[in-house]
């Protein structure tokens, strides 16, 4: 069901339509939020702060995401984890508070640092990743355990799977929604299907439930 909702959201967004925000609980202070323009987003409420996964596509939808988070908790947002660099996942950062810890795979940072074809002309220089993952990192943020995993180039060359081992949840990008043989990112123009398969296998081995902010 989650995959189907993500597909419907992408169709509406492709037509330039912002859909109403809706919060979906995954249990244990974990949520995914659909609607607005751009990808779904993950929200994890920790002991002292909030971790957001992906930021939607526009500043307006980023602000809408922040408003939904504020309805869930008064704790401050402290971290953002990016699944990859495509604009429908990162351009909403422009409406987020400055000074956040932003975590991404190393190739995702490189893609965000280089000029991009961006019809929205959104400046993300103040929102570049501040903590880099190469292949695998285990860390605890605000009392919540995370495993950040990069298996192979798949949807882009800088994908991350965000695994919460205690909750048995993995947040992913479009790699898990469906396998696509055509290239979707200029940074990896001849992406083999083997990368998608490696990421899919890694995610499904990691978690009992897969939530896809696609």
Image (spheres, helix red, strand yellow):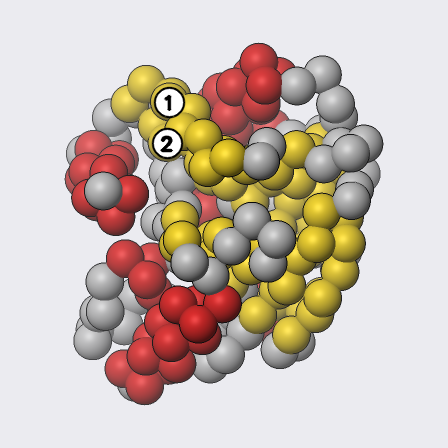
Q: Position of residue 208 (x, y in %)?
A: 42, 58
Secondary structure under badge 1? strand
| Image side of residue 19 versus residue 68, left or right | left
- What residue appears at the point 34 percent right and 65 percent down from the top-left corner? 175
Residue at (40% x, 39% y) in the render: 40
Q: Exactly how many numbered labels are in the figure?
A: 2
Q: Is residue 102 something that shows in the picture?
A: yes
Indicate which disc, 2 or 1, sits on the residue closer to the N terminus.
1
Say which mark, if any, is on residue 34. Answer: 2
Which quarter of the picture shows residue 4? top left
Quarter of the image where the N terminus is located: top left
Mark 2 falls on what kind of element?
Answer: strand
Above or below 9: residue 110: below
Indicate the position of residue 135 as horizontal and vertical percent values: 62, 78
Q: Residues within 10 Å of mark 1 (few under 14, many from 20)?
A: few
Residue 77 as seen in the image, left or right of residue 4: right
Residue for point 70% across, 70% down: 137
Question: Dot 2: few (<14), some (14–19), or many (≥20) neighbours within 10 Å?
Answer: many
Q: Position of residue 31 (x, y in %)?
A: 49, 34
Task: Locate residue 135 relative to residue 90 in the image: left or right.
Answer: right
Is residue 36 in sight in this rendering? no
Confirm or deny contact between disc 2 and disc 1 (CB under 8 A).
yes
Residue annotated with mark 1 = 22
Q: State whether residue 64 is above or below residue 209.
A: above
């Amino acid at each position: 069901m989650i995959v189907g909702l993500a597909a419907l959201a992408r169709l509406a967004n492709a037509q330039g339509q912002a859909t109403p925000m809706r919060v979906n609980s995954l249990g244990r202070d974990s949520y995914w939020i659909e609607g607005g323009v751009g990808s779904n987003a993950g929200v994890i409420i920790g002991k002292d702060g909030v971790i957001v996964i992906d930021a939607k596509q526009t500043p307006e939808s980023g602000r809408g995401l922040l408003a939904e988070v504020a309805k869930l908790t008064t704790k401050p947002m402290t971290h953002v984890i990016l699944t990859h660099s495509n604009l429908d996942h990162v351009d909403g950062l422009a409406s987020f508070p400055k000074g956040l810890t932003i975590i991404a795979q190393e190739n995702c940072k490189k893609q965000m640092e280089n000029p991009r074809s961006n019809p929205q002309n959104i400046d993300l220089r103040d929102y570049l990743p501040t903590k880099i993952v190469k292949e695998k990192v285990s860390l605890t943020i605000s009392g919540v355990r995370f495993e950040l995993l990069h298996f192979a180039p798949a949807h882009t060359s800088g994908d991350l799977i965000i695994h919460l081992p205690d909750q048995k949840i993995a947040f992913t990008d479009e790699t898990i929604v469906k396998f696509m043989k055509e290239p979707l990112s200029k940074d990896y123009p001849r992406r083999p299907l083997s990368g998608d398969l490696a990421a899919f296998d890694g995610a499904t081995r990691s978690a009992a439930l897969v939530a896809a902010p696609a």
